Structure formats: structure tokens, C-alpha cells
Image: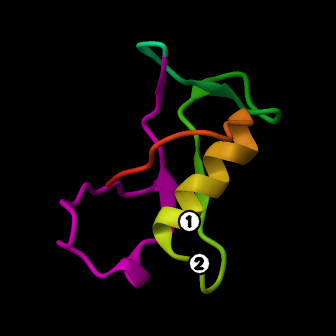
Amino acid sequence: MINVSFYNENEIQDELLKFAVIAARYQEKWIFCRHKERVTWEIPGGHREVGEDILDTARRELYEETGAIYFQARL
């Protein structure tokens, strides 16, 4: 089981975050992805790479899982 916690911006040190989970919308609809190893729909997200800023992790994961190139990312 994984413990999930939510934090406000600047409430936790960036280097302590291990995953980025992205709640994204396109044309007023929420984005969900189907994982190739599961049958469930999930929101984009994934593991942080070594030395990577968590916002860069979110941008990379959104691109990798949806192909999104142009977007606004904010905490």
C-alpha cells in the first residue's frame, strides 16, 4: 500500500517528493491514460529521475504519457 499526501506549494522540500501526479485538462475535459500493463484509467504521473526538479518530472511524464507539447504547468 502507498501512502498519498497532498501539500501546498512550498510546504515541503522539493527533493523529498518522489512522484509527480498531474491533474490535466484539455478542452474542459480531464485527461486519463490507460497503462499498458493494467486495465484501469489513470491520471498522468510517474517517478522522479535522479536530480530532476519535480515540476520537470511532471512536464516529462505528461509528455511521455499523453504526447502533450504545449501546456501550462503550475503547482
> Hey, what amino acid is under mark 2?
Glu
Q: Nearer the viewer, residue 22 or 72?
A: 72
Q: Residue at x 44, y 56 (%)?
A: 2
Q: Position of residue 43 (x, y in %)?
A: 53, 33
> Hey, what amino acid is under mark 1?
Asp
Circle 1/circle 2 CB separation < 8 Å: yes
Q: Which mark is residue 56?
A: 1
Start-end of magenta stretch: 1-26
Which secondary structure class fits the magenta region best? loop
Q: Residue 37 occupies which quadrant of the picture?
A: top right
Q: In the image as oriented, which residue stretches furthest toward the top?
A: 28
Q: Which residue is the site of mark 2?
A: 52
51 in relation to 33, above or below: below
Q: Position of residue 42 (x, y in %)?
A: 57, 30
Q: Residue 32 occupies which quadrant of the picture?
A: top right
SS at badge 1:
helix
Asked if residue 24 lies in the magenta stretch, the reply is: yes
